[in-house]
Image: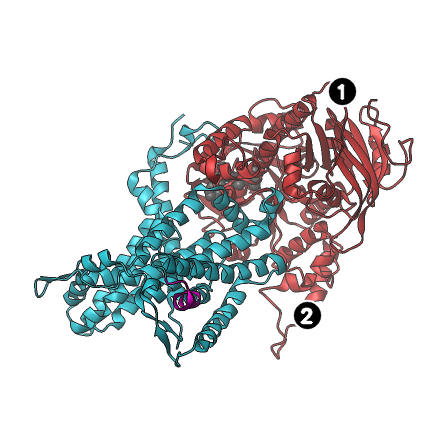
Amino acid sequence: MDEYAIEMLEVTKVFPGVVANDKVTLRVRENEIHAILGENGAGKSTLMSILFGLYDPDGGSIRVKGKDVRIRDPNEATALGIGMVHQHFKLVHNYTVTENIILGLEPKRRDGTIDLSGAERRVAELSERYGLSVDPRAKIESITVGMQQRVEILKILYRNADILIFDEPTAVLTPQEIDELMSILKRLKAEGKTIILITHKLREIKEAAERCTVLRRGRYIGTVDVAGTSEEEMAAMMVGRAVKFRVDKAPAKPGDVVLCIEDLTVMSAKGHPAVKGLSLDVRAGEIVGLAGVDGNGQSELIQAITGLAKVHTGRILLEGRDITRLSIKERVEAGIGHVPEDRHKHGLVLDFRLDENFALKCYDKAPILRKFGVLDFGAMADKGETLIGEYDIRAGRGPATKARNMSGGNQQKAIIAREIDLSPRLLVVAQPTRGLDVGAIEYIHKRIVAERDKGRAVLLISFELDEIMGLCDRIAAISKGEIVGVVDAAAAEERAIGAMMAGVRGGVRDGGRGREQGAS
Amino acid sequence: MASDTTGKPQPATLRVGALDAFIASDGAISLLVVLLGFLCGTVLILAVGRNPANMYAALLQTLTGFDITRGTWNARYIGEWLTASMPLILCGLSMGFAARTGLFNIGAEGQYVMGLTAAQFVALYGPRISGLHWALALLAGLVAGALWGALVGWLKARYSVSEVVATIMLNYVAYFLSRFLTQLIPAANTYRTPAYPETALLKNALFERLTNGSRLNTGLFVVALCVLFYWFVIERTKLGYELRATGFNKEAARCSGIKVTRSITASMAISGGFAGLAGVIVALGSFGYGRVLGGLDNYGFNGIAVALVGNSTAGGTLLSGLLFGMLASAQPLMQSRQIPKEVTWIISGLVVVFISLRAGFRMIAEWRQKRIAEKGGTRDE
Ligand SMILES: Nc1ncnc2c1ncn2[C@@H]1O[C@H](COP(=O)(O)OP(=O)(O)OP(=O)(O)O)[C@@H](O)[C@H]1O
Ligand SMILES: [Mg+2]
């Protein structure tokens, strides 16, 4: 008989309108990396929230290290040695790493003052031992997202956790950071920790996990040995059908220039140039991908195009019309759709119903807007039903579901559905498939290609080279706010693009202006 | 047993009975809370050795004008009750409108004072044309309250000044400004101005006759219109949608093209407008002369409780305003029946405290839903 660190037996959790976990069983062996795989809304986060004491289960039992337990709140979970790295970090930004880690259990000296230097030493030790290379004295606001995640890991290690839960830890990371996280996970395992890893990326499961439990629609499907199961098999198990990993598309038939960026400079929030004299064209009927490492001006570029950030110098033209000074509203009207990078901040009103969220960009038009500024909420709900069906969005109460109560992936699907449904002349998509399951990714890619084939222009920002290579017709590499090169996706080599992303020029004939590549 | 949550509409949702829908609704919670408040009040009266029936007799008289002990009927009590409720309802709407659009307007008091002051000036100096005179005063009070609120909204939207801090400050500014300005009026003494001309009064002869000479006045129409306006704007219009979106998530609203500075300013302006109208109704409905305020009337602050109990919905706020108005206007009747009038304050206080138990009721509702799901309320496959 195996030694189990965690046994969740027949666990059930019901939310209004939906059974999030229906007699789910999860058995995690001592000292293994155990992956949980499941579609968006399958109930993974809910199951982990139960284990961490955030939700009370409605049925089933939990055993930790062989002992029956009831976990009523996160403190009890911590006492049992369970720690969780949340997808949205809970860090105080103007505190140092150590101050954040000791928050709530500050070590006291005999005179009652906080022993900060002692704590710093311990944090440094832990960081050393698990290969995290975190500076205990750095301020949170000055470190990268990847580092912040490590601070979260340190936080739970500091509390002596030996069972670590990671809920989609790689969704916020760049490919390099993902590689580093994978080796951190292995290191943690080597040091005797047990790890539960939720991810939609099969490659990560293949790389790090030993066993994988699959959920579908709240139900337990099975647990497999990762080594003996292919990615395709796992995908099929989770979605219930075979999934295509490659995007099917005909060659692009680019038309006129839709988006023309001329010599654009945009300042970052801190006041130095984030986009420097950048020029780029996107034509009707093509998907242009912006490949680059996070923080090289992509965010500022999108924000300048969509009107969220001010343009310092240069011009942006949409179908020949200068939109540089237009308001956000005017740009929406002119035909710009936008799937924003930060979905909670820019994409959704979490306290609105799902159908009200769908209406965010069309509430001021028929059929939703009627005479005298009155809205037709019936029409709004109808529209909601349609989009829910079309995009297979899982929401317990249909159009009436609060966006807050939807799973992360379904929130993302909702935003994409809203933007694609408008069928804008120019669709600016940032990280469209972050947090989506493979089935949903397949569908969203298909829809983006369909928009292209309708003659729309698409500008895609993604940190995942695979996605860019698979989906785009042309690829522009961005580094330090400048376009380093533009290449045809069909002829592109992953290595060459990687080099350009690192700032090495190549693959272009006109010094990065990227004009000549469209069909003329 | 599991519910299948594909996009298809009906099968995914659990069937929930009317009782559960009721338990889960905010209105039910408010109702329970109010009952609980009265229960505590009753126990309290028993504890001090009085007869709680007297309290209920006083409340009955307030609501219906019927004196159960003497068997007489006087409609004036109904009129006074409604009169006392009017500013409470309006201030409740003021607070509620802000709350529904993500703002905390603790400054209804100041906006009320501004409305009241503006109305007093128009009453004393406006054109003495019947019909026009008081209408102008209403307009002036509305505008004054709205501007006082809009200022806060604009400061918040433009310079991220917390509306809580700004409104508290402006409450005091309004109070002292009102005192200062009113005392400038010739022939005003330290507590009042000369009487208003007849044309300025909100008097309504029909209401007076119906309610046996109570102070019930034309303001009642204003309140009714405001409740309708509130419901319509919040629940039905594009403007309400934009304001709510901005209130919940300013960034997402901005991203979808809503002008958030304008939205926040508009929210506070509308919120302030309600409070300003409350000021006018008190100034020209309940008094025949302008007052140099010697203290705050507290309608603005009570509005917070009204909105809370009314769940910031139009109908709820109306009912809850009537409830608080009843408690306030029943006080003299209670005293005459040997019930300490403080009981009414205790009851209103308790009601507000209990409202925060809402979370507890939510849990009961969820628990019941779960049981239904277990019993097979979901579609079997
Ligand atoms: N607080 C809540 N209230 C109501 N329903 C909820 C709540 N949290 C989750 N749900 C519902 O429970 C189901 C499972 O959600 P959960 O977040 O566990 O999914 P998930 O597997 O983590 O999906 P994703 O991959 O998209 O993150 C979803 O249908 C979701 O709508
Ligand atoms: Mg999740």
Q: Amino acid at mark 1?
A: Lys
> Which image quarter holds the N terminus of chain A?
top right
Q: Residue at the spot x=62%, y=44% of the render? A: B255
Residue A116 got which mark? 2
Q: Position of residue A463 (x, y in %)?
A: 74, 39
Chain letter of the residue beneath label 1 in the structure image: A
Mark 2, secondary structure of its residue: helix
Mark 1, secondary structure of its residue: loop
In the rendering, what colour is chain B?
cyan
Residue furthest top as drawn? A250
Q: Quadrant of residue B336?
A: bottom left
Q: Is residue B76 above or below residue A463?
A: below
**In magenta stretch: residue A222:** no
Q: Amino acid at mark 2?
A: Leu
Q: How is the image coloured?
A: by chain
> Which image quarter holds the C terminus of chain A?
top right
Q: Which residues are magenta?
A: B117-128
- The residue that disc 1 covers is A253
User: Reading the chain from its start, which is encountered first: label 2 or label 1?
Assistant: 2
* Residue A57 in view of the camera: no
**In magenta stretch: residue B123:** yes
